[in-house]
Protein backbone atom coordinates (compact mmCIF):
# COMPACT_ATOMS: atom_id res chain seq x y z
CA UNK A 1 0.00 0.00 0.00
CA UNK A 2 1.17 3.52 -0.86
CA UNK A 3 0.11 6.47 1.29
CA UNK A 4 -0.19 10.02 -0.08
CA UNK A 5 -0.90 13.23 1.81
CA UNK A 6 -1.23 16.77 0.55
CA UNK A 7 1.50 19.31 1.22
CA UNK A 8 1.40 21.98 3.93
CA UNK A 9 2.03 25.72 4.13
CA UNK A 10 4.25 25.62 7.23
CA UNK A 11 7.78 24.53 6.40
CA UNK A 12 10.64 23.40 8.58
CA UNK A 13 12.71 26.50 9.52
CA UNK A 14 15.86 24.50 8.71
CA UNK A 15 14.75 23.85 5.12
CA UNK A 16 17.00 24.94 2.26
CA UNK A 17 16.38 26.90 -0.94
CA UNK A 18 17.44 26.55 -4.53
CA UNK A 19 19.63 29.50 -5.46
CA UNK A 20 20.50 31.71 -8.40
CA UNK A 21 24.04 31.91 -9.78
CA UNK A 22 24.71 34.88 -7.52
CA UNK A 23 23.52 32.81 -4.51
CA UNK A 24 20.19 34.54 -3.90
CA UNK A 25 17.47 32.31 -2.45
CA UNK A 26 14.62 31.33 -4.77
CA UNK A 27 11.13 31.18 -3.30
CA UNK A 28 8.71 29.36 -5.58
CA UNK A 29 5.22 30.84 -5.79
CA UNK A 30 2.27 30.62 -8.17
CA UNK A 31 2.45 34.23 -9.39
CA UNK A 32 5.84 35.92 -8.96
CA UNK A 33 4.62 39.19 -10.51
CA UNK A 34 2.13 39.64 -7.67
CA UNK A 35 4.53 38.67 -4.87
CA UNK A 36 5.86 41.28 -2.42
CA UNK A 37 9.20 42.84 -3.30
CA UNK A 38 12.52 42.01 -1.66
CA UNK A 39 16.12 42.07 -2.85
CA UNK A 40 17.25 39.20 -0.62
CA UNK A 41 15.36 36.57 -2.61
CA UNK A 42 13.96 35.85 -6.04
CA UNK A 43 10.39 34.75 -6.73
CA UNK A 44 9.83 32.18 -9.46
CA UNK A 45 7.49 29.46 -10.69
CA UNK A 46 8.88 25.92 -10.68
CA UNK A 47 8.68 25.81 -14.48
CA UNK A 48 10.26 29.20 -15.11
CA UNK A 49 13.65 29.16 -16.83
CA UNK A 50 16.45 29.71 -14.32
CA UNK A 51 19.51 31.86 -14.93
CA UNK A 52 21.47 28.66 -15.61
CA UNK A 53 19.38 28.05 -18.74
CA UNK A 54 17.17 25.12 -17.68
CA UNK A 55 13.90 25.31 -15.76
CA UNK A 56 14.02 25.25 -11.99
CA UNK A 57 12.13 21.95 -12.09
CA UNK A 58 14.78 20.41 -14.33
CA UNK A 59 17.51 21.75 -12.04
CA UNK A 60 15.79 20.20 -9.00
CA UNK A 61 15.50 16.87 -10.78
CA UNK A 62 19.20 16.96 -11.63
CA UNK A 63 20.05 17.96 -8.06
CA UNK A 64 18.22 14.89 -6.76
CA UNK A 65 19.96 12.65 -9.30
CA UNK A 66 23.34 13.80 -8.05
CA UNK A 67 23.01 15.63 -4.72
CA UNK A 68 26.74 15.32 -3.92
CA UNK A 69 26.99 16.75 -0.40
CA UNK A 70 23.64 18.58 -0.75
CA UNK A 71 25.18 22.09 -0.82
CA UNK A 72 21.81 23.87 -0.55
CA UNK A 73 20.73 21.84 2.47
CA UNK A 74 17.48 20.67 0.90
CA UNK A 75 15.39 18.43 3.12
CA UNK A 76 13.62 15.23 2.05
CA UNK A 77 9.94 15.98 1.58
CA UNK A 78 8.84 14.16 4.74
CA UNK A 79 11.01 16.58 6.76
CA UNK A 80 10.16 19.73 4.81
CA UNK A 81 6.72 20.20 6.37
CA UNK A 82 6.46 21.20 10.01
CA UNK A 83 3.46 19.12 11.09
CA UNK A 84 4.62 15.89 12.85
CA UNK A 85 2.16 13.72 10.88
CA UNK A 86 4.62 13.61 7.94
CA UNK A 87 7.26 12.03 10.15
CA UNK A 88 4.69 9.58 11.53
CA UNK A 89 3.61 8.50 8.04
CA UNK A 90 7.22 8.02 6.92
CA UNK A 91 7.85 5.82 9.94
CA UNK A 92 4.58 3.93 9.46
CA UNK A 93 5.03 2.77 5.87
CA UNK A 94 8.64 3.66 5.01
CA UNK A 95 9.88 6.58 2.95
CA UNK A 96 9.74 4.59 -0.29
CA UNK A 97 5.97 3.98 0.09
CA UNK A 98 5.03 7.43 1.33
CA UNK A 99 4.37 10.30 -1.11
CA UNK A 100 3.53 13.99 -0.90
CA UNK A 101 1.05 15.64 -3.27
CA UNK A 102 2.64 19.05 -3.67
CA UNK A 103 0.83 21.99 -5.26
CA UNK A 104 4.24 23.22 -6.39
CA UNK A 105 5.99 20.07 -7.56
CA UNK A 106 3.39 17.34 -8.12
CA UNK A 107 3.52 13.82 -6.72
CA UNK A 108 6.91 13.33 -5.08
CA UNK A 109 8.29 10.51 -2.97
CA UNK A 110 8.90 11.42 0.64
CA UNK A 111 12.68 11.13 0.31
CA UNK A 112 12.80 13.58 -2.63
CA UNK A 113 14.98 16.57 -1.73
CA UNK A 114 12.61 19.52 -1.91
CA UNK A 115 13.28 23.28 -1.60
CA UNK A 116 11.12 25.79 0.23
CA UNK A 117 8.10 26.90 -1.80
CA UNK A 118 4.82 28.67 -1.12
CA UNK A 119 2.21 27.35 -3.54
CA UNK A 120 -1.20 26.02 -2.58
CA UNK A 121 -4.66 25.26 -3.93
CA UNK A 122 -6.28 26.79 -0.86
CA UNK A 123 -8.75 29.59 -1.69
CA UNK A 124 -7.84 31.22 1.63
CA UNK A 125 -4.24 31.87 0.57
CA UNK A 126 -2.81 35.14 -0.75
CA UNK A 127 -3.28 35.44 -4.50
CA UNK A 128 0.40 35.08 -5.41
CA UNK A 129 0.54 31.74 -3.58
CA UNK A 130 -2.60 30.22 -5.03
CA UNK A 131 -2.23 27.81 -7.94
CA UNK A 132 -4.94 28.16 -10.55
CA UNK A 133 -5.83 26.19 -13.67
CA UNK A 134 -4.27 28.84 -15.91
CA UNK A 135 -0.85 28.39 -14.22
CA UNK A 136 1.70 26.28 -16.04
CA UNK A 137 2.86 23.27 -14.02
CA UNK A 138 4.73 20.29 -15.47
CA UNK A 139 4.10 18.28 -12.32
CA UNK A 140 6.44 15.53 -11.23
CA UNK A 141 4.91 12.08 -10.97
CA UNK A 142 7.32 9.90 -9.02
CA UNK A 143 4.97 6.92 -8.61
CA UNK A 144 6.30 3.74 -10.27
CA UNK A 145 4.68 3.33 -13.69
CA UNK A 146 1.64 1.03 -13.70
CA UNK A 147 2.01 0.26 -9.99
CA UNK A 148 -0.34 -2.46 -8.76
CA UNK A 149 -0.31 -1.18 -5.19
CA UNK A 150 -3.39 0.35 -3.63
CA UNK A 151 -2.98 4.09 -3.08
CA UNK A 152 -4.59 5.94 -0.16
CA UNK A 153 -4.91 9.73 -0.19
CA UNK A 154 -5.35 12.09 2.76
CA UNK A 155 -6.18 15.62 1.65
CA UNK A 156 -8.71 18.33 1.05
CA UNK A 157 -11.08 18.54 -1.91
CA UNK A 158 -8.95 21.23 -3.57
CA UNK A 159 -6.21 18.62 -4.09
CA UNK A 160 -8.41 15.73 -5.26
CA UNK A 161 -8.33 16.72 -8.93
CA UNK A 162 -4.52 16.69 -9.08
CA UNK A 163 -4.40 13.40 -7.18
CA UNK A 164 -6.80 11.78 -9.66
CA UNK A 165 -4.86 13.09 -12.65
CA UNK A 166 -1.45 11.98 -11.44
CA UNK A 167 -2.56 8.52 -10.29
CA UNK A 168 -4.64 7.68 -13.35
CA UNK A 169 -2.21 4.93 -14.40
CA UNK A 170 -2.37 3.09 -11.06
CA UNK A 171 -3.55 -0.51 -11.43
CA UNK A 172 -4.39 -0.90 -7.75
CA UNK A 173 -7.39 0.65 -6.02
CA UNK A 174 -7.25 4.37 -5.29
CA UNK A 175 -8.88 5.44 -2.02
CA UNK A 176 -9.67 9.03 -1.07
CA UNK A 177 -10.61 10.06 2.45
CA UNK A 178 -13.08 12.95 2.60
CA UNK A 179 -15.08 14.62 5.35
CA UNK A 180 -17.68 16.70 3.52
CA UNK A 181 -21.30 15.70 2.97
CA UNK A 182 -20.94 16.52 -0.72
CA UNK A 183 -18.42 14.02 -2.09
CA UNK A 184 -15.68 15.37 -4.37
CA UNK A 185 -15.58 14.33 -8.00
CA UNK A 186 -13.04 11.52 -8.19
CA UNK A 187 -13.65 9.26 -11.20
CA UNK A 188 -12.17 5.79 -10.77
CA UNK A 189 -11.52 6.26 -7.04
CA UNK A 190 -13.15 4.82 -3.93
CA UNK A 191 -14.33 7.44 -1.43
CA UNK A 192 -14.16 6.88 2.31
CA UNK A 193 -15.84 9.29 4.77
CA UNK A 194 -13.89 10.42 7.81
CA UNK A 195 -16.25 11.71 10.48
CA UNK A 196 -14.85 14.63 12.45
CA UNK A 197 -15.89 18.09 13.62
CA UNK A 198 -12.54 19.45 12.48
CA UNK A 199 -12.90 21.50 9.32
CA UNK A 200 -9.42 22.92 8.68
CA UNK A 201 -6.57 20.45 8.21
CA UNK A 202 -8.84 17.56 9.17
CA UNK A 203 -6.68 15.26 7.04
CA UNK A 204 -3.95 15.30 9.70
CA UNK A 205 -6.39 13.82 12.19
CA UNK A 206 -7.51 11.31 9.56
CA UNK A 207 -3.94 10.21 8.82
CA UNK A 208 -3.22 9.73 12.51
CA UNK A 209 -6.36 7.63 12.91
CA UNK A 210 -5.24 5.49 9.96
CA UNK A 211 -1.76 5.00 11.42
CA UNK A 212 -3.25 3.99 14.77
CA UNK A 213 -5.59 1.48 13.11
CA UNK A 214 -8.75 3.33 14.13
CA UNK A 215 -9.92 3.55 10.51
CA UNK A 216 -9.31 1.33 7.48
CA UNK A 217 -10.07 1.48 3.78
Image (cartoon, rainbow, N blue to C red):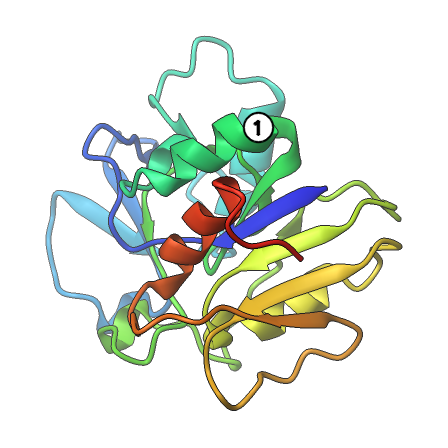
Q: Position of residue 51 (x, y in %)?
A: 42, 42
Q: Nearer the viewer, residue 173 or 70?
A: 173
Q: Nearer the viewer, residue 90 or 196?
A: 196
Q: Residue at x 48, y 45 (%)?
A: 56
* Residue 22 versus residue 66 in the image, above or below: below
Quadrant of image for the C terminus: bottom right
Residue that carries the numbered disc 1 in the rendered image: 95
Q: Nearer the viewer, residue 211 or 161?
A: 211
Q: Position of residue 57 (x, y in %)?
A: 54, 46
- Write down the quadrant of residue 44 in the picture: bottom left
With 12 as the anchor, is 54 left or right in this view? right
Q: Residue furthest top?
A: 69
Q: Residue at x 44, y 8 (%)?
A: 69
Label 1 Cα crowd, 10 Å radius (few <14 / some 14-19 / many 20+): many
- Write down the quadrant of residue 205 in the picture: bottom left
Q: Residue furthest front?
A: 214
Secondary structure at badge 1 equals helix
* Residue 192 versus residue 78 in the image, above or below: below
Q: Position of residue 144 (x, y in %)?
A: 79, 40
Q: Residue furthest bottom?
A: 182
* Residue 178 versus residue 56 in the image, above or below: below
Tell me if residue 201 can be seen.
yes
Quadrant of image for the N terminus: top right
Q: Residue at x 27, y 40 (%)?
A: 82
With 197 as the anchor, is 13 left or right in this view? left
Tell me if residue 19 can be seen.
no
Q: Position of residue 4 (x, y in %)?
A: 58, 50
Amino acid sequence: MILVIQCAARKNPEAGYLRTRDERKVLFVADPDAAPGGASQVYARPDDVADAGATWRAMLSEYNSNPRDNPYGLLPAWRLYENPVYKLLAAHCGQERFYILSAGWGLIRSDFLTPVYDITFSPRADGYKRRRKKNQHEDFNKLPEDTGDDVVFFGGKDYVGLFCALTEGVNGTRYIWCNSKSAPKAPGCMLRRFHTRTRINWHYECARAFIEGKIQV
